[in-house]
Image (cartoon, grey):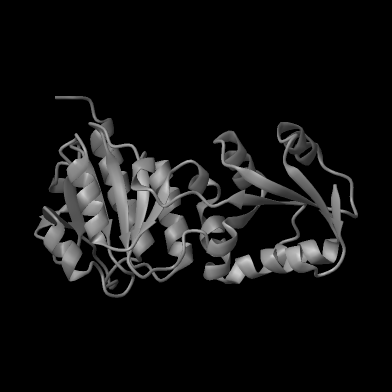
Amino acid sequence: MQRISSRNARFQVWQASLTNRTKRQRSGEFLVQGVRPISVAVDNGWPVRTVITDASRPLSRWASDLLRRLPDVERVAMAPELLAELGEKDDPEVIAVLELPADDLDRIPVGPEFLGVVFDRPTGPGNIGSIIRSADAFGADGVIVTGHAADVYDPKAVRATTGSLFAVPAVRVPSHREVLDWVRRSAAPVVVVGTDEHGPTDVYDFDFTQPVLLLIGNETAGLSTAWKEAADHLVRIPITGSASSLNAANAATAVLYEISRQRSRPAQ
């Protein structure tokens, strides 16, 4: 077991990965903390490169069990003040260093009951995390982030998923083109449905029981023109009161709930 008590080169790589997307990509790894997120990652077979523990205190039962489940993974005991820096605002007992998965759309299964979510050019990592969490809660097969966007593996996004990142594939792609090519290659007849406040169809009047790729737009600008043109249908969420619109993550959650509601109804 390695011990780290100073800001050596390894510590600096991990620290940089918290705030620098390029360095995160270059190292091919990201940091995860919290009992539930780490447990879900291990349960779902995510590759763990290193487990970092607090060198100053005995392991909890959960941490001991975790290390027993990962007998071949590198273990690092770190000085508590350094571990706290990697934990940012929290005081973690354990931080897991996970391998970044490939941004391969084929990680997302497409079948006769397919439900995928596209988040177009999101700027807030917390919104990405919230949508991944809702996608997991309402049975989506995967989440796709397109365009120039915040990063799925930003610590704020990872925390906001509360572990759902490790249960639902999340893939980053440059543009709508790659997604549309992938959908066309699938055997299922996927319908592309965009959300737009001026959409002609209310969300509860649309048939979501068919294979669907749901499009959620940028928090400020909404869907890009390219995505609107690519959509087979545009739907809107009717709202009342003084609110002019919904937060992107809230809108996605509302539509995902409606999809889940429709799909759970007994066949007529």
Q: Residue at x 68, y 66 (%)?
A: 13
* Image-quadrant location for residue 221: bottom left
In-image side of 212 versus 79 (left or right):
left
Question: In this rendering, is residue 86 above or below 134?
Answer: below
Question: Residue 258 placed where, x, y %?
Answer: 27, 45
Q: Residue at x 22, y 44 (%)?
A: 212
- For the residue pair 225 and 106, the one nearer the viewer reads as 106
Question: Residue 14 placed where, x, y %?
Answer: 68, 63
- For the residue pair 71 and 31, the one nearer the viewer reads as 71
Residue 88 in sight: no
Q: Residue at x 19, y 34 (%)?
A: 187
Q: Residue at x 76, y 32 (%)?
A: 68
* Image-quadrant location for residue 202: bottom left
- For the residue pair 97 and 212, the one nearer the viewer reads as 97
Count of numbered circles on the image: 0
Question: Residue 46 placed where, x, y %?
Answer: 57, 41
In-image side of 9 versus 171 (left or right):
right
Question: In this rendering, is residue 185 above or below 7?
Answer: above
Query: Quadrant location of the C terminus?
Result: top left
Residue 166 in sight: yes
